[in-house]
Image: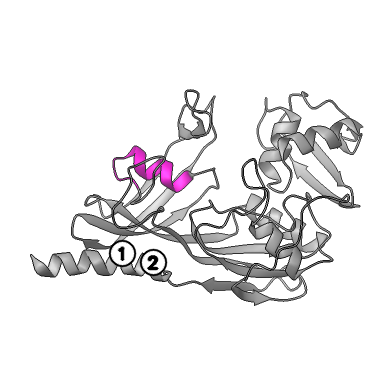
Amino acid sequence: MSLIKLLVDNSGVRLDKYISEHCPEISRTHAQRIIEAGQVTVNGATARPSLKLNTGDTIAVEIPPPAPTSLTPEAIPLKIVYEDNDLLVVDKPAGLTVHPAPGHPTHTLANAILSHLPQLDTGDWQRPGIVHRLDKDTSGLIIIAKNSHAHQSLMEQFKKRQVSKVYLTLVYGHITPEEGIIDAPIGRDRSHRERMAITDIEHGREARTSYHVLEYQGQYSLLEVKPETGRTHQIRVHLAAIGYPVVGDKVYGIKSPLIDHQFLHAHRIRFQLPSTGESIEFQSELPSDLRKTLDIIQGHEKER
């Protein structure tokens, strides 16, 4: 049994929703189950999933040992950038879903992790060791916790925005100015529930993304992007909202003849090691398909 403690930083949010938003390894359904089982307290007392929280409330979440599940270890090759007793950093390829979901019950990063770490005992069984997420078609660096101590330490770092993430992305058009900050709340699109959208703060959560143009490539812009918050699809939603959708993004942009998935890569990540507090940074270069896309664009420009 592991214990996660949360200090509520905004009022009016349901207990089950708050837990699922601040503990990515716990789905909202899973949160409801453990609340109803009495494994969650608010200010020392048990509560209902629908309880509306107040700023300053203290939540304690007891995570039970993982129950036997149908999640099957799969010997999917992992590109491991770093590993110690607490965690590993994996360079995820585009096309690999992070954890099981409707329509993707197998062949996920979670299945691969369970094969690499069969004794892993942290988090929701569907999200073993997962402390943050990458979209299926986003490539790059992702951290996996190997034990409860590391899991809680990393979750706290993400909550306090102490983890620095830098992405590389290619967008349509010459974005101007060459650097800036997009500050706009993001929430569920009420017309298309599978999408996210810019919304007002009452129906979404604050979201900020900074960007810097690395170079203009023909009719495109290659950007270095830093999400200051961690909302679902944040980079893709923000860039599309200002008129520069990510190349190959079929949800918030248009299909591209150059590439069959979005050009978005988790390039660098910096955080503190749970065991020592040492700040450490890792970097992943663009995978071959994204590099080939840039080469094609550069080749077209030389022909003009």
Residue 142 counted in the magenta span:
no
Q: Which element type, helix, strand or loop, lies under badge 1?
A: helix
Contact? badges 2 and 1 (CB < 8 Å): yes
| Residue 286 drawn above or below residue 185 | below
| Quarter of the view holding residue 297 | bottom left
Residue 254 in the image: state x and y as whole percent: 32, 43
Pointer 2 local density, CA inside 10 Å: few below 14, some 14–19, many at least 20:
some
Three-letter residue code for mark 2: Asp
**Measuring 31% from the left and 64% from the top, which residue is drawn there?**
293
Look at the image and tell me in which quarter the C terminus lies. bottom left
What residue is shown with label 1?
A: 293
In-front residue for pair 182/1: 1
The residue that disc 2 covers is 289
Residue 131: x and y, percent? 68, 55
User: Could you tell me residue 80's position as x and y percent?
Assistant: 62, 74
- Examine the rendered structure and indicate whether residue 278 appears above or below residue 169: below
Q: Which residues are magenta?
A: 234-245
Q: Is residue 278 above or below residue 33?
A: below
The local crowd at label 1, few if under 14, some if 14 to 19, many if 20 or more residues have their Cα within 10 Å, is: some
Extreme-left residue of the structure: 304
* Residue 299: image location, x then y, percent: 18, 69
Q: Which residue corresponds to the image point at 86% horizontal and 50% vertical from the top-left?
A: 3
Residue at 81% x, 49% y: name it: 4
- Distance from disc 2 to disc 1, alpha carbons, whole Å, reads 6 Å
Count up the numbered dots.
2
